[in-house]
């Protein structure tokens, strides 16, 4: 029996409208990451957000980092430097209370919004510009728009995997109590 299109992984659901063909895998990975995070954290308690079993990064850190790294890498892909506001956000990654308590829901909302922003940028990207050199960081280390988009997708999926393991361990520990 073939699974319904809604239960297939995103990349098996077909092309996304208005996303250039070379950027489809990036868009698919970002949507897959969003779906996996939403499913995993749907009932994840705020009380476990900053726990670090075996001294690994917390679920809260991963959610903040996922949002921030997409913003930063897509900024570089546009050929821009990071703003003071982006650098300030980077400095807060992994901190449980910057402007008051942070919830799973608020972090997921920020990540979802950043995925939407990234998808809009992918749709607006001229494929002819993908191999143009883009500088990364203050040192302006050379990459390309395509390289930055692909790295953003793989980096996002890497952190989703780490977030998944950490969340499952914490939930298992909580249910064992």
Image (spheres, grey):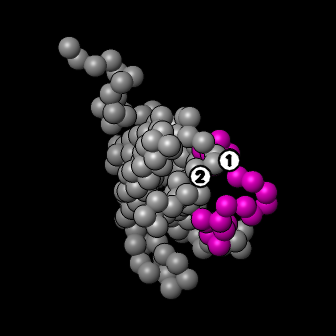
Q: Are marks 2 and 1 in contact (CB under 8 Å)?
A: yes
Q: Residues within 10 Å of mark 2 (few under 14, many from 20)?
A: many
> Residue placed farthest to the left in the image?
1
43 or 119: nearer the eye?
43
Residue 34 location (% of width, % of height): 49, 41
The magenta stretch spans residue 122: no
Q: Which residue is mark 2?
A: 49
Q: Earlier in the sequence, mark 2 or mark 1?
A: 2
Residue 46 location (% of width, % of height): 64, 46
> Which span of residues is magenta-colored?
89-110
The answer to whether residue 49 is visible is: yes
Q: Residue at x 51, y 61 (%)?
A: 52
Q: Residue at x 65, y 65 (%)?
A: 95
Give the alpha-carbon distance from disc 2 to disc 1, as whole Å. Answer: 8 Å
| Element marked by disc 2 | loop
> Residue placed farthest to the right in the image?
99
Q: Which residue is mark 1?
A: 103
Residue 87 location (% of width, % of height): 65, 73
> Residue placed farthest to the front in the image?
177
Asked if residue 41 lies left or right of residue 143, the reply is right
């Amino acid at each position: 029996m073939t699974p319904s299109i809604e239960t297939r992984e995103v990349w098996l659901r077909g092309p996304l409208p208005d996303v250039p063909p070379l950027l489809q895998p990036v868009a698919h990975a970002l949507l897959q990451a969003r779906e996996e995070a939403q499913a995993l954290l749907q009932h994840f308690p705020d009380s476990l957000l900053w726990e670090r079993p075996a001294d690994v990064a917390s679920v809260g850190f991963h959610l903040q980092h996922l949002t921030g790294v997409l913003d930063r890498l897509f900024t570089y892909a546009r050929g821009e430097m990071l703003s003071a506001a982006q650098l300030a956000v980077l400095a807060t990654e992994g901190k449980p209370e910057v402007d008051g308590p942070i919830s799973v829901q608020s972090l997921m909302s920020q990540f979802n919004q950043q995925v939407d922003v990234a998808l809009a940028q992918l749709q607006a990207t001229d494929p002819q510009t993908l191999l143009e050199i883009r500088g990364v960081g203050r040192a302006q280390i050379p990459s390309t728009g395509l390289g930055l988009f692909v790295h953003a997708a793989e980096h996002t999926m890497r952190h989703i995997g780490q977030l998944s393991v950490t969340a499952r361990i914490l939930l298992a520990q909580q249910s064992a109590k």
